[in-house]
């Protein structure tokens, strides 16, 4: 049994009503999950206020309520802990409840608009090959060494994070690589975790629906570095406009990586093709099967983190050249008749620009570059016209379609994207609401050597419409269609 006062260690408490010497079972922030002797944390969310569910939580058996405002009627058998911020309190309690698991392994957090999944997944791959037990918390999957768990968020809530870290402790994981999203930082999901290091990849427009302004989005990301301890390291992409800004107030030891500017970790791109990149990393030539300049940054970040974690240089470079691409990130497939297909998770203007630019750099220009792209519903609407403009400017044909419409009307999302398509690009742009039909049309249009880029959903194996997720896998669908069409 765990005693309430043990999990309240370091929680900023404003007032207490009732005993803190009570036994508790689990902590939940959803009243519907509460059973007898559980702690209910009332969170003021985006759509609901957890304080409205205190009564329901108590009816389900909660014997402790953590809240920002005490309910008008308090029940004598229940302990009430009033705190300033319930999300902060939840994060601290979660660490305490699971015995501060982040202190028993080396935890590295990766933040930035694009590249988090790629960098964390490659670090997982590299450290596994080096023979360590490794953890991964990413958009695609959570891994406790070899065991996989599904996940819905990039950075899960603090209870979930700590429960997986605890499981990692139990099986002897030494290194854990995790994605730190801006929502995660804003909602204190990672607060109180003991990070050995933090990495900044880049910053461009995304999530303005949530953060409202770019400056606020940037400053939330910076908060992650402000919170690192002086024992840790902070590694930043110095070529990014905000790279140095991120580290301005960090107490951690700072390091830089980049292609354009002189810094601690440097990469030069020597050759690029659809079969990979030839790089010069800090003076040594390395071959990798990754495609695209942006992946030179990702690989360099991986090399730098491995170096900062004291992997021997020779092993680091050898392993770097063995790394395999991550699911849905510039995933390349060649059809039986020689049509190139690229499935990529580009769902921001910057990512779309990068993948298209990269593809244009590699192709010989006589082929068509057919881009199939959409934007998610209930998310940043201002990125839609920007993505329309970029798709039109950098492709020879564009098919605008649906991504995950969620609760929005798919046609009105497409109309928002169309608004950004410039006049000279209108004649090469089609709009087809059904993603399946859009992909089929691209397959019908494509000839040998042409390139079909399907952007936005990468590894996702579903399409979400009105809260219902149906099977949908871009790569599987395009392969089936090309086969059916004998292409
Ligand atoms: C906008 C957002 O970030 N929402 C997240 C947030 O929910 P919320 O606090 O707004 O919840 P709410 O619905 O307002 O409810 C408030 C509270 O009342 C509680 N409640 C509600 C009903 C009830 O009957 N009883 C009850 O106790 C809820 O459990 C909650 O604690 O906190 C929840 C728990 O941690 C998250 O699951 C939820 O993520 C939603 C599902 C989501 O889609 N989030 C996306 C936008 C997200 O976080 N994405 C990032 C970024 C990815 C990237 O960078 O690309 C990510 O890290 O994945
Ligand atoms: N270093 C990078 N710079 C710019 N774009 C990148 C970079 N790495 C990947 N991308 C592009 O961004 C897309 C998403 O990459 P990745 O999944 O690694 O990013 P992420 O930060 O995890 O995204 P999310 O916020 O959705 O979790 C890729 O499919 C690719 O198009
Ligand atoms: N982590 C990203 C995922 C976007 C993926 C795209 N397919 C969409 O559904 O919008 C987000 O929450 O914005
Ligand atoms: Mg990710």
Image (spheres, rainbow, N blue to C red):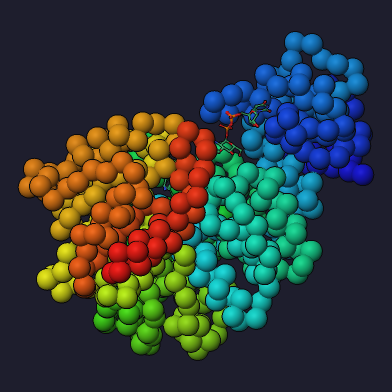
Q: Nearer the viewer, residue 76 or 31?
A: 31
Residue at image position (70%, 34%) is 29
Residue at image position (65%, 57%) is 149
Q: Where is residue 110 in the image (x, y as percent from the top left)?
A: 50, 58
> Is 43 above or below relative to 3?
above
> Looking at the rendering, in which quadrant would you find the N terminus?
top right
Residue 197 shows up from this direction:
yes
Quadrant in which residue 388 is drawn:
top left
Q: Nearer the viewer, residue 108 or 471?
A: 471
What is the number of callouts on the image? 0
In the displayed structure, does residue 389 sit left or right of residue 5? left
Residue 234 shows up from this direction:
no
Q: Position of residue 178 (x, y in %)?
A: 57, 58
> Is 33 above or below relative to 354?
above
> Looking at the rendering, in which quadrant would you find the C terminus?
bottom left
Q: Position of residue 208 (x, y in %)?
A: 37, 37
Quadrant in which residue 57 is drawn:
top right
């Amino acid at each position: 049994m765990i005693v309430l006062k043990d999990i309240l260690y370091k929680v900023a408490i404003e007032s207490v009503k009732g005993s803190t010497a009570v036994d508790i079972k689990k902590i939940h922030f959803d009243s519907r999950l509460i059973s007898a002797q559980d702690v209910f944390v009332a969170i003021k969310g985006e759509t609901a206020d957890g304080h409205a569910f205190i009564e329901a939580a108590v009816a389900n058996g909660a014997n402790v309520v953590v809240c920002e405002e005490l309910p008008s009627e308090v029940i004598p058998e229940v302990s009430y802990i009033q705190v300033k911020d319930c999300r902060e309190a939840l994060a601290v309690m979660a660490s305490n409840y699971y015995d501060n698991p982040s202190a028993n392994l080396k935890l590295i957090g990766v933040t930035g608009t694009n590249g988090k999944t790629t960098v964390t997944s490659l670090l997982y791959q590299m450290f596994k090959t080096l023979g360590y037990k490794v953890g991964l918390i990413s958009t695609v999957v959570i891994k406790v060494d070899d065991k996989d768990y599904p996940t819905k968020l990039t950075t899960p809530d603090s209870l979930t994070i700590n429960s997986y870290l605890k499981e990692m402790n139990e099986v002897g994981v030494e290194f854990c690589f995790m994605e730190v999203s801006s929502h995660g930082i804003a909602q204190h999901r990672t607060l109180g975790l003991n990070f050995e290091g933090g990495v900044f990849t880049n910053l461009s427009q995304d999530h303005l629906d949530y953060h409202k302004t770019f400056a606020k989005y940037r400053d939330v990301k910076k908060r992650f570095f402000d919170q690192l301890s002086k024992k840790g390291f902070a590694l930043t992409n110095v070529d990014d406009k905000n790279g140095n800004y991120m580290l301005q107030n960090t107490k951690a030891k700072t390091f830089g990586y980049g292609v354009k500017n002189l810094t601690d970790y440097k990469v030069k791109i020597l050759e690029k093709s659809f079969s990979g990149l030839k790089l010069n990393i800090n003076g040594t030539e390395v071959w990798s099967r990754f495609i695209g300049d942006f992946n030179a940054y990702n690989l360099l970040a991986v090399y730098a983190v491995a170096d900062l974690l004291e992997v021997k240089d020779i092993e680091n470079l050898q392993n770097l050249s063995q790394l395999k691409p991550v699911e849905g990130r510039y995933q390349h497939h060649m059809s039986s008749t020689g049509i190139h297909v690229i499935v990529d998770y580009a769902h921001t203007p910057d990512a779309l620009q990068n993948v298209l630019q990269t593809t244009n750099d590699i192709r010989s220009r006589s082929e068509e570059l057919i881009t199939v792209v959409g934007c998610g519903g209930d998310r940043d609407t201002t990125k839609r016209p920007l993505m329309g403009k970029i798709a039109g400017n950098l492709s020879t044909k564009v098919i605008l379609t649906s991504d995950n419409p969620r609760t929005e009307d798919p046609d009105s999302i497409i109309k928002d994207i169309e608004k950004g398509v410039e006049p000279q690009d209108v004649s090469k742009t089609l709009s087809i609401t059904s993603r399946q039909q859009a992909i089929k049309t691209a397959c019908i249009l494509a000839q040998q050597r042409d390139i079909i880029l399907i952007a936005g959903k990468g590894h996702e194996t579903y399409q979400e419409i009105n809260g219902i997720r149906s099977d949908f896998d871009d790569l599987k669908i395009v392969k089936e269609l090309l086969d059916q069409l004998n292409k």
